[in-house]
Image: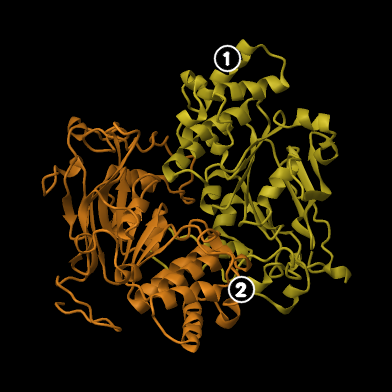
Chain colours: A yellow, B orange
Amino acid sequence: MAILERHTTPPAPTRDAAEPLVRVEDLKVDYLSGRGPVRAVDGVSFALKPGEVLGLAGESGSGKSTIAQAMLRILQPPAVITGGHVHFGGRDVLDMSDDELADFRWRDMSMVFQSAMNSLNPVMTIGDQIMDAIRAHEDVSAGEARKRAQELLETVGIEAKRIDSYPHQLSGGMRQRAVIAIALALRPPLMIMDEPTTALDVVVQKEIMYQITELREQLGFSILFITHDLSLLVEISDRIAIMYAGQIVELAPARELFEHPLHPYTQGLMSSFPALTGERVKLTGIPGSPPDLRTPPTGCRFHPRCAHRMPHCSQIVPQLAEVQPDHFVACHLYPQSTPGGAA
Amino acid sequence: MSTITTADQPIAITAPTDNVMEVDHLSVRFPVGGLFDKRAVHALTDVSFTLPRAKVVALVGESGSGKSTTAKVLARLVKPTEGRILYQGRDILKEEPRKASLTYRNEVQMVFQDPFGSLNPAHPISYLLERPLRIHGVVKGRQAIQERVEYLLDTVGLRPANEVKDKFPYELSGGQRQRVAFARALAVEPKVMLADEPVSMLDVSIRVGVLNLMEHLKEKQGISFLYITHDIASARYIGDQTNVMYAGRMVESAESRELIAAPAHPYTKLLLSAVPNPRAGLRTQEAPTRGEIPSLVDPPAGCPFAARCPHVMPVCRETMPGITHLAADHWVRCHLHGAGDAAAD
């Protein structure tokens, strides 16, 4: 049965000399349930370079949000990190004490949550909420914090005079900008954005995406951008990792992934959203549904839905291997992915 | 076609039309505030469109544009302040003013956005499908009902039907639940389905399957769909005609591909430019237009898009433009294209 064990995947190497900002290594997260643990994230490894935007795509239940929460150590029971490392600035986030974490969060890594517009405190002005974030970490006067809050609001495209507005006085898009301002407050080198525009209308989404891109170019922070919307991800990301049932199945530069997806799941995703231009072709989507992680399929987790499955797909777990320069895929169609196959 | 016969029963037709539904100058206002507050939310203003037999008509727009209100009015869940609904040529608001007849409720079915909230979790799928069959007396007898349940599940692609019917909603995925919702609506052999964002809560890989199911039902069973979505690309995918709504008004209508190839209204153009387009890339594009849908509480006169429109002219703030026909199946309400063939009301 040794062959069924998933080996530790080496961290996806980056070709550039730049030292990665954060390196997630063989991360495992279980949700404890009455019927035994459910592995939501199963041996995920990736790295982010300074200034890079890494997109993390996957369907609901694929583990993408769980990864984000594990990286910030904000997972709530019944979720438990059961293995792996998150290397950041020479330290392992998973080994940090509570005090270290309190200092680390927001200063080094901040997060814009899913439906962030509702994560603002309704009875505090947005100015107070930004000042809160600043003064929790830095010993600055209220006046100084307020000045910085005003600057931050302008940075994200909100007039400084709105500093004393309550969340309900702002539109959805403005609230989302305010949340980004809070995430930016301490100028962290890494920002995790978990579906930051999902609840917004397309036009507002476009504005926010444009703003995020502009801010990143000005300030140079890295983004781990999580969404199920692949077309959005291709627009904003430098590289994209595709998740399926708790594992990364493909990782490649955004354009390369979009134009030459290698994993059958990624190919299926690409033929799942209708195009705005070109011939109206019949799309097929992907048959079946994502698996129940209480009883994940053996071998490759995608094999029950895969049109290209081979006999050994249900027996041997494929490994994320670099089949083309910078293009990693975990699929037996590529011999490098099969343990013991061509190197 | 002056007489229309459908497979199951002949229907009394008064208007020689192929439109199963015609919506005529529909307006909905909701009062706001207290007793003496005269203000009102103008949820829908002067909306007219037709739903041809065995076609998919898409309504696209942002939240607050009035798409869902339109569906609710057609489902008779919301009473319009003004306007007519002609169903199979009958003025149903006049004929059935207080409550829709069983026949209407039977023939016009609604499918909701949230498949997690729209199925009773306490009952197996078979029960959920048997109920409408019994209430509407579609088929009689235990055996016949069971057969019909399996047939319906099979039709919506839930196979093997004899296993699926004994499951409970929690045992099904989102896409499967949405298929059950479609099966339940189909149970009573509707002529019209009002599908309000039926795929927006589903996973990407599942969405296309549900869209294809709608297309299949349209072609095989001749059902007309009102497909409500914020996703203009999916409207192009299954919509025969696409109507664009903004702030409670319908601003443009065209054959779906024509709308995307040659949008006439500045709002339609804005909507199209906002759709993520991996081919173009975000970085190369100029800053998008700012702003959101204006307040619908006593909106000012004129075009509701005037505040955001890059081409705004003085006349736009004064009068609402009328309808200008650009082609047989393409009209727009915008002063850039003239004051309208018909005077604005």
Subunit ID for the residue under disc 2? B
Q: Is residue B332 left or right of residue A94?
A: left
Query: Along the line of sight, which residue is nearer the eye, B211 or B338?
Result: B211
Residue drawn at x 51%, y 26% as measured from the top left = A166
Q: State which quarter of the image contains the N terminus of chain B.
A: bottom left
Quarter of the rendering containing residue B100? bottom left
Q: Amino acid at mark 1?
A: Lys
Q: Residue at x 27, y 38 (%)?
A: B304
Q: Residue at x 70, y 49 (%)?
A: A66
Horizontally, residue B8 falls left or right of residue A17, namely left
User: Quarter holding the C terminus of chain B?
Assistant: top left
Q: Residue type at mark 2? A: Lys
Which residue is disc 1 drawn over?
A: A147
**Residue B168 placement (x, y as % from top left):** 60, 70
Judge the density around disc 2: few (<14), some (14-19), many (≥20) Cα neighbours within 10 Å. Answer: some
Residue A337: x and y in percent read 75, 65
Q: Residues within 10 Å of mark 1 (few under 14, many from 20)?
A: some
Q: Name the side, left or right, on which A275 lies relative to A309.
A: left
Query: How far apart, in angstroms, are the residues tagged by discs 1 and 2?
Result: 59 Å
Task: Between label 1 and label 2, give the one nearer the viewer.
Answer: 2
Do marks 1 and 2 both belong to one polypeptide chain?
no
Q: Looking at the image, is A180 positioned above or below residue B94?
A: above
**Residue tagged 2:** B167
Residues at discs 1 and 2 in contact (Cβ within 8 Å): no
Residue B330 image position (x, y, % from top left): 22, 56
